[in-house]
Image (tube, rainbow, N blue to C red):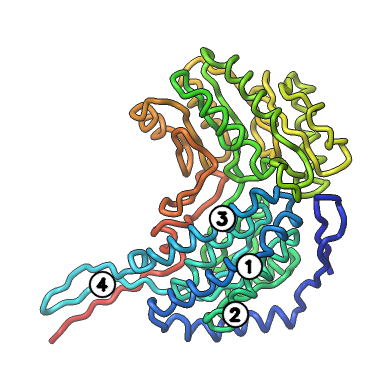
Amino acid sequence: MFETITPIDNSVLVKREYATEEDIETSLSNSYSEREHWKNISLEERKKSVLNFVEIFLKNKDVSSNLCKQIGRPIAQCPGEMRGFEERARYMIENADRALSRVVSIKNDEFDNYIKKEPLGTIFVIAPWNYPFNTSVNSIVPSLLAGNAVILKHSSQTPLCAEELYEAANQSSLPKNIFQYLHLDHNQTSRIISDSRINHVLFTGSVSGGKQIKKSIGTRFIGAGLELGGKDPAYVRADCDLDHAVENLVDGSYFNSGQSCCGIERIYVDKKIYNTFVEKFKDVTEKYILGNPLEMETNLGPVVKQSAANNIRTEVNNAISQGGKNIIDNKKFNLDDGNNCYVSPSALINVDHSMKYMMEEIFGPSVGIMKVENENEALSLMNDSSYGLTASIWTNDKSFAENFGKNVETGTFFMNRCDYLDPGLAWTGVKDTGIGVTLSVLGFDHLTRAKSYHIRNI
């Protein structure tokens, strides 16, 4: 048995039982049996069934409320998760033919040589709590379209999300056992990964979690897509539209209470505009409303759990004890009493890379701001990280931005925006951010294996 504690008031929201060993065996066995049938259905029919599943899910009117209660995201922002889910799902459905099409080598009267993209088998998806639908759709939809079966494990913080997705799939025209979910503890998760009936693992979470996935795979010759930590930087150049940069970087720092893998955690500002940037950043941030996420005017809710809140406060206080200064007036946010999940937003200046605060993921509503002499210093500091998910530059010089971006060690490079995902672009990272690709037509390649056909007519 496990309990999901809502961060709104630290009360018990949901109680569920972990899957039994019999449940796990049944799920693995059914998935193994069903996938042989599913992969032989035409892509056109698979697309219709997946679209039916997506459209049924989108009709669920309780998703936003349940999401708010499980993770504390403001209710006014929760519909964005559904919009992201729909945008990504429809993109992948509409582009499945292109992504899964044959690669022709030779085609003439004598030879018909081509590569066909075959499904891997059963994909085990381990989804995080912070964007429970937007991350899982990246894995579930293309896996199904490619002809794979899917078993989903959601975080114990978001069990309702797994159940809501399964209910929609169960009502759709998808075969009964092609998409399943299980509530699992860590040991059960590791045992499933090591089972021979699992052919690929897709995990979004911490670096330590990614290492455990690799350990559980052991000597098995299967792949894993691992989207892990981030410490995403921004460089604010002197020629930028300053108001636009401030507004978007404040949002990029504090949306979802800073609990985003691609959220802004480091900002490097040209010395010519540094003081003005800091003043404007402070002014915009102090207009935020930290409050009950079920109230529509709230735009900053609690972080996910008490232990996370305590850790964020500790890291911020440690940085301040080392010389950092919080420019945000905490008195503006009177819900934060140090004993709940409501963490006041903070922006620290007088910080540097000798501090853990600027090197390790905080995953909360806090961002460090540093003054830089020029673009060379900015580039050096941006790359001085073990992570590399996204990075952004704020400038009116497109040519400069594109040349600068070539040298930034990151999976996605933005100009004049941040914390956004285009389903037509590959979502990937470098260094400790992980391996693999989701989204775009390239994402399908990691869910299939190449099979070559050499056909000769006599």
Residue 358, percent from left and from top: 65, 30
Query: What is the CA distance from the residue labelled 4 to the residue labelled 2?
Result: 37 Å
Q: Nearer the viewer, residue 212 or 98?
A: 98
Question: Mark 1 packing: few (<14 Cα in 10 Å), some, or many (20+)?
Answer: some
Q: Nearer the viewer, mark 2 or mark 1?
A: 1
Q: Nearer the viewer, mark 3 or mark 2?
A: 2
> Which image quadrant for residue 97?
bottom left
Query: What is the CA distance from the residue labelled 3 to the residue labelled 2?
Result: 30 Å
Residue placed under numbered mark 3 in the picture? 226
The residue located at (61%, 79%) in the rendering is 170
Residue 215, percent from left and from top: 64, 60
Q: Residue furthest top?
A: 272
454 in relation to 239, above or below: below
- Which quadrant is home to the N terminus? bottom right
Residue placed under numbered mark 4 in the picture? 114
Q: Going from the N terminus, do you reach mark 1 or mark 3 first?
A: 1
Q: Going from the N terminus, do you reach mark 1 or mark 4 first?
A: 1
Q: Nearer the viewer, mark 1 or mark 3?
A: 1
Residue 412, percent from left and from top: 46, 43
Residue placed under numbered mark 2 in the picture? 171
Numbered badge on residue 60:
1
Amino acid on which disc 4 is placed: Tyr
Q: Nearer the viewer, mark 1 or mark 4?
A: 1
